[in-house]
Image (tube, rainbow, N blue to C red):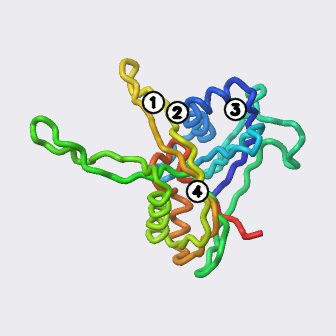
Amino acid sequence: MYLSRLILNPRNRRVQNEMARPYELHRSVLKAFPDAMPDSERVLYRVDHDARGERLTLLVQSESRPDWTWAEQSPGYLLDDGSVADGPLAVKEFALALQPGQVLAFRLRANPTVKKKSHERPDGVMPPNGIRLGLVREEDQRAWLERKGQQHGFRVLRLLIAPEGMQVGHQPVSQEQPRRLAHMAVRFEGVLQVTDPALLSEAVRAGIGSAKSFGFGLLSLARLR
């Protein structure tokens, strides 16, 4: 897999537009993969903000090597202020080698939801897929992550939960009736223990939770400092 790191310029008009309109950032990320990708391949991404809001770091994880030529050629899009040793754009290839019992730091921006059945329509037919409701209470968000851990091969040892509010935008499904996007954003950080390396490796590859196409689900792992 490949991990791209782009330092974005928060004063750039295009960057500001992408931060305000999630679908535009989605489109920009996919421009790095001009060739058609197989349906099984997942591109995950996340925007991390520094404490003062002066730097935006876009992380993109992919199975194919990306081509960020468009970002390098877009005037002022990347923040090239010399503060990062390897520059505002870096791409590295990596492979996970997880072991049972291994303890790692993690970060995940997720859209924690629960699926509820929709109300019946007037004709008495129940919509098959139901609806997803965002989990607002911290205890419910914590329980959601613990369930994901059981499903994906890890146990949460320490956890910090930081709500980021609603991410709202529109997806132009049709010119007449764009689809409204509204996702609850929650950032999870802490320490986990690997219980099943194969399951956790697949979770890193495929992402966790819903709304993966709009900046959610990327699970970052790192050695403890």
- Mark drawn on residue 70: 3
Asked whether disc 1 touches disc 2, contact meaning CB atoms under 8 Å apart, the reply is yes
- Against 178, residue 107 (above or below) is below
Q: Is residue 13 left or right of residue 133?
A: right
Question: Gap between marks 1 and 2, in whole Å?
Answer: 6 Å
The first of marks 3 and 1 along the sequence is 3
Amino acid of disc 3: Trp
Disc 3 element: helix
- Mark drawn on residue 171: 1
- Mark drawn on residue 161: 4
Amino acid of disc 1: Gln
In this rendered view, identify the residue nearer to me: 160 or 12.
160
Question: Gap between marks 3 and 1, in whole Å?
Answer: 22 Å
- Mark drawn on residue 23: 2
Q: Image point 66% across, 55% down: which residue?
A: 2
Q: Image point 12% across, 35% down: which residue?
A: 122
Asked whether disc 2 touches disc 3, contact meaning CB atoms under 8 Å apart, the reply is no
Residue 123: x %, y % from top left: 9, 36
Q: Is residue 170 left or right of residue 204?
A: left
Residue 223: x %, y % from top left: 72, 69
